[in-house]
Image (cartoon, helix red, strand yellow):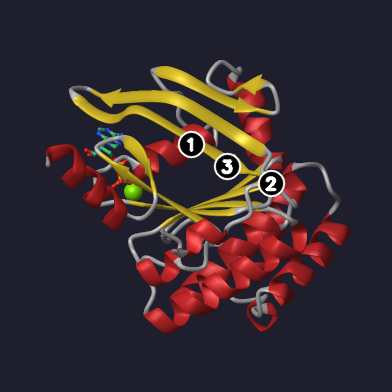
Amino acid sequence: MNARDEQPLSGETALISAHGLKKSYGRTEALRGASLDLHVGEILAVTGTSGSGKSTLLHCLAGIVRPDEGVVDYGGEQLDRSAEARLSELRRHDFGVVFQFGQLIPELSALDNVALPLLLSGIRRGPANQRAGEWLERFGVRGQADLRPGEMSGGRSQRVALARALVTEPKAVFADEPTGALDSLAGEQVMTALVHTARESSTAVLLITHDAQIAAYADREVGLRDGVVHSGSPDDVGQEAARHEG
Ligand code: ADP
Ligand code: MG
């Protein structure tokens, strides 16, 4: 019996449900019929080799990239058909994103970076700064509030990026290899902070990672291979393939 068999099957409500996603870039088929549910409040790891379509899948679920075919359902709304204005509203209010590195604005302090999404959604400077400070605190980087990204370690700057993704209290956070550029200690600190905060606020996390140790923080793991989702880790995918071939 492995860890996944122990997951409770009840109470799994899909927050975002993607079905049959296809996406090509020229002649490259990045997604070839990928289906995936992200449940309310769960931490879901998506693993797979480089080029298997992980980032493209994340972008489709987050309404950043429109699939060529297939459906992305978010509470009855079909994101694959939503207008750009609606998608950017969702990205501001309902979804947070974190990438491997470099997504903070280099000219702004940590505090201003975290306050920015709040200012963009119409919250005034005073309360926005207040809340940004609280989120820096939750990620253990309040002491870095006045520093710019270039003046911080990679691990701290990723924790600021997480604070920025979560400050609007989104329903889902999409994290594309958020620890990919960090050493293992910093990676662990970032993951611990993310998992703790996501659980506290029942935020769903779609976490892309290469790293089995990082995937172990998730409630559930799926593997992506050649643009198709397989349940279980890449090892299980290998066994599945072997069964088909044998
Ligand atoms: P992963 O994140 O698993 O490495 P990606 O989703 O980034 O995979 O890419 C899947 C495939 O699509 C790769 O072959 C990649 O080169 C290609 N691809 C992704 N984005 C683009 C793009 N904007 N233009 C052209 N090809 C792309
Ligand atoms: Mg990628």
Q: What amino acid is found at the position of numbered circle 3 in the picture?
A: Leu
Residue 219, x across and y down, in percent: 56, 59
> How many angstroms separate mark 2 from mark 1 (CA)?
18 Å
- Name the quarter where the C terminus is drawn: top left
Q: Earlier in the sequence, mark 2 or mark 1?
A: 2
Which class describes the residues within 10 Å of circle 3: few (<14), some (14-19), or many (20+)? many
Quick check: marks 1 and 3 in contact, CB under 8 Å? yes
Question: Looking at the image, can residue 72 be seen?
Answer: yes
Q: Amino acid at mark 2?
A: Ser
The residue that mark 2 highlights is 10
* Circle 2 residues within 10 Å: few <14, some 14–19, many ≥20: few
Percent x, y of residue 40: 68, 45
- Element type at mark 3: strand
- Residue at 67% x, 75% y: name it: 145
Q: Give the quarter of the image for residue 244.
A: top left
Instruction: Return the mark for residue 38.
Output: 3
SS of the residue under disc 1: strand
**For residue 26, which quarter of the picture?**
top left
* Distance (Cα) linking label 3 and label 2: 14 Å
Q: Quadrant of ligand 1?
A: top left
Q: Position of residue 204 (x, y in %)?
A: 64, 50
Residue at point 79%, 70% (across, down):
134
